Structure formats: structure tokens, C-alpha cells
Image (spheres, rainbow, N blue to C red):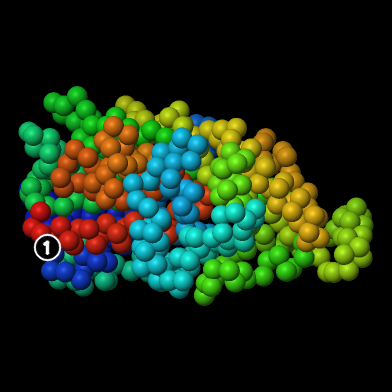
Amino acid sequence: MEPVKTFDADVIVIGTSIATQTVLLPLLKTNARILVLEGGDYELTPFGNNLTFSDERGHYINHHWGGHWLRQYGGASRVWNGFSAPLENWDLIGIEGRPKWPLGIDELEKYYRISAPVMGEDPSVANLTKYNVAREFVDRPYIIMDPALAYADAKPLLNNKNVELRVKHNVIKFTCDDSGSFINGIWYSVEGTVHFASVKKNTKIVLGAGGLGNAQILLQPAANRRVAVGNESGLVGKTLMAHPHIAVGEGFIDPIVVRKPTWAQVNYKKWLPAYIIGADYKTKLKLLNASVSLTISAIRPLSPNEEAVQDFYQKKWRKKLDLYTLYARTEQLPNVDNRIEIIADKNAAGLHKLKIYCVFGARDLMSLDTTTRMLSEHFLKNKLGVTTVDNDAIFLKPWGWAHPSGITRFGTSPKESVCDHTGRVWSYQNLYLNGSSLFPTVGYANPTWTIAALGMRLGDHLVAELKKGT
């Protein structure tokens, strides 16, 4: 497509992952004129793949972040499915001095229910948001995401007369009006050639370029301006969080432990058995939120010692015990030293590259360890299983998934957040964000379902704003 001098639309949506596809769903039911800008092509290209290389330091290195940040139509949502779960009230209310979420669990549960079909699941999975918090352990499964929307097919957008889709359009940064209240322009590049397009004052802009991409754009230097457009709070790039994920041990477990739970009355389609510590116990023990899932171990010969242990407990408890792997996931505590910064070098699209620091803290890893050991003791005490816990895997070889969160967090005040409760950047009347970068705390699970819920919520908000003419 030829460059234009003005992006003439009611709504401009940047990115095509689940963070923006869900925003689009309510908007597509209106007559709004929508422009969608995607940095990648319809398929991943060498040019797009090279845009996400960063200087990575800490526990995530060797293109770990960039390898989970795909510049193609559909973004990472198109490729990386996984194990997701809803947040709980405990995640939102600011336990142990952590930042609070600017919305309550009832509001979030509503949109979990609405967005569940997008995740390929039944709305009843939203029942998992609430449980008996006084229980020591809660069997709270993950949903195994198999999205009904694959995000690989652009036809729904291409065939909509109200939508213009432009691929290979990498947004670099925004410009604002003299009052600093509205975004009035977008610098972008097409295969390395930089262009500028103005934006009308009443155009709503939704930035959903990925957990890292959102912050990268808001950190780009502005001409004739001391502060980057979008970083007036000075908080963009701060408190980067991800998810330590570790195979923490194995054990001989009673298969009853992995049966489908019935307490939440959920009609699961695909699920993974997992346990968490109840909220009251987590608070008392000053733990972070963690989960231990159980999967049948790969078939392998047992050692003589393992055979002896299995035989001993099967005879003692008079039940069959199968070998399972325990896999623990935890949230990462917000820490200002975990952050992203821009460096002088630019990528081929014209954006300053990133330097990324992400280091697990003592409480992150100790919460994994304590949760796993408490569950192991619970199994043994109740004759449900006997397990081992791998200390070295937890403390010497920690690893995880790159679910970048927290670096453009939303909140209730511009002094402690980048965006308001809707995802609108505080300084601007027409710039909104969606994605895991909004999360003040990250929970223990893959964030995709929460991203989808927030996307549907933002879409509804924008529909209401367009009806008001604001």
C-alpha cells in the first residue's frame, strides 16, 4: 500500500495479536471505520524475525524474549498457546504492598466469561476465579488453550468494508499536540523506509504491539521534547515481570489426585490438573501465588530404588500409584531493577533496540519451593503420593517463559501507573494500550486469557465512547 499523509479512521489498532483482535470484536459490530497496522507480514519473514533481537541479561538470555515476540499477522498468539488460568481476587488487591489492580474480581470475571469462547473454552471456566480461600490446597486446573480464533486468517478483516488492514507497517513512535493531550501523528516504517502520518483529534488509538513492544514504542525519543510521548509517568519499562516455570520433581501419585475437579462446576474442554495454596494460607505464609501441575511422566525404566519406593507405598496404602512430573509456576514480584531500556542502536524498522534485565528474586524462587514442598507433604500425609523435590532445579537452574508484564501498568493514579483503569495513557485522551504490559501483578499462569478479557472490556469501552462522540 502507498503511504498516506493522514490515517483517516475512527479507530487505529496497532498489532493483530489476541491483545487487539479481542478489542476489535465489539468494534466490528459497529459502523466505525477501523485502520489496523501490523508490523509483520502475513507470515514470518527474516526481516520481521530480526526486529526483536535485544540485549538480554539475567535469567532470560539468548533471544529468549525475542523468540516469544513474533512480528507476523496474529503475533505470538498465533503460535504460542499454553496453559492459562484466571486471576483470583488475591492477585488484585495489593497483598504485601504489591500494586493493586484498578478493577475488581467481579468485573474481571465478567469478561473472563465473555472472552472464554475466544480461548476455545466454555464460559463456565470463569467460575475458577472464586474458591474457598480458607482451604490449604485448591485443585485449580489450567485450561489448555486451543483458541477458536487462530489469528492466522486475515480474511475477517480484509473482507470487512469498514476495516483497512496494512501489514509491514511498523509503528515507531507517536507525536502529540502542543497541549500534550492528544496523539496527532504516527511515525512508522515499511520495510525500513520511514514515513509520517497525521492523526485526527477524535481518532482513538489502541496500541497492542506485545508486552515488550508497547513499552518499546513509548520509550522512543521525541523530537524537541524532553520526555518520550507516552512516558510522562516515567514508569514505562519499569517492573518487568515474567513467570518462573520449573520441573520441580517427580512422584508416585494416586490417580485420584488428577481427576477432574467438580467444585467449580466447570465444563472443561481441555484442562491440566494443578493445585494452588488457598489465599488465606498464602497471606499467612507471605508466599507469592504459585501453582503445581501434574503430568504423567514420560515412560522410562525405573531405577531399583524407585521401584522399591513405588512397591513399598503401593502395598502400604493398598492402591496403585503412577509416576507423575510436578511442574511449578509462580508469579514474579514487581521489582524496579527488572526493566527494559532503549539503547542507541536501532533495528531495521527504525526503533531503538532494547536492553532487558530480568532476574528472579529470593521470594519468587522460595515461593516455588515452599508451595511444592507443602503439596508434597500434603500428598504424603493423606496417602495420596510420595514425591521428591529438586532443589537444584529451583535454586540453581531456574527458568521460565517470556510473558513480559508490568512495564506499562494501569492503575488509579498517574503517580503510580502509566494508564488508567481502561488502559488509556493518562496524558492522552485518545491513546489506549492492551496486553500483559498493563498487569500490575502477573499471577502464575500464561496471561493470554486475561489479555483477552481486558481486550473485550476495552472494546466495549471504545464502543461506548464512539456512541458518545468523545
In the displayed structure, does residue 273 sit left or right of residue 460?
A: right
Q: Does residue 140 sit above or below 178 in this rendering?
A: below
Label 1 packing within 10 angstroms: few (<14), some (14-19), many (20+): few
In the picture, which quadrant includes the C terminus?
Answer: bottom left
In the displayed structure, does residue 77 sit left or right of residue 288?
A: left
Residue 259 point in image, percent of width and height: 67, 70
Going 29% across and 48% down the picture, which residue do you hit? 421
Does any portion of residue 167 appear in the rendered image? no
Q: Nearer the viewer, residue 268 or 53?
A: 268
Does any portion of residue 294 appear in the rendered image? yes
Q: Nearer the viewer, residue 90 or 35?
A: 90
Query: Which residue type carries mark 1?
Result: Lys
Image label count: 1
In the displayed structure, does residue 297 sit left or right of residue 228?
A: right
* Element type at mark 1: helix
Residue 215 point in image, percent of width and height: 32, 39
Going 65% across and 53% down the picture, which residue do you hit? 136
Q: Which residue is mark 1?
A: 467
Q: Does residue 226 sit above or below 138 in this rendering?
A: above
In the picture, which quadrant includes the N terminus?
Answer: bottom left
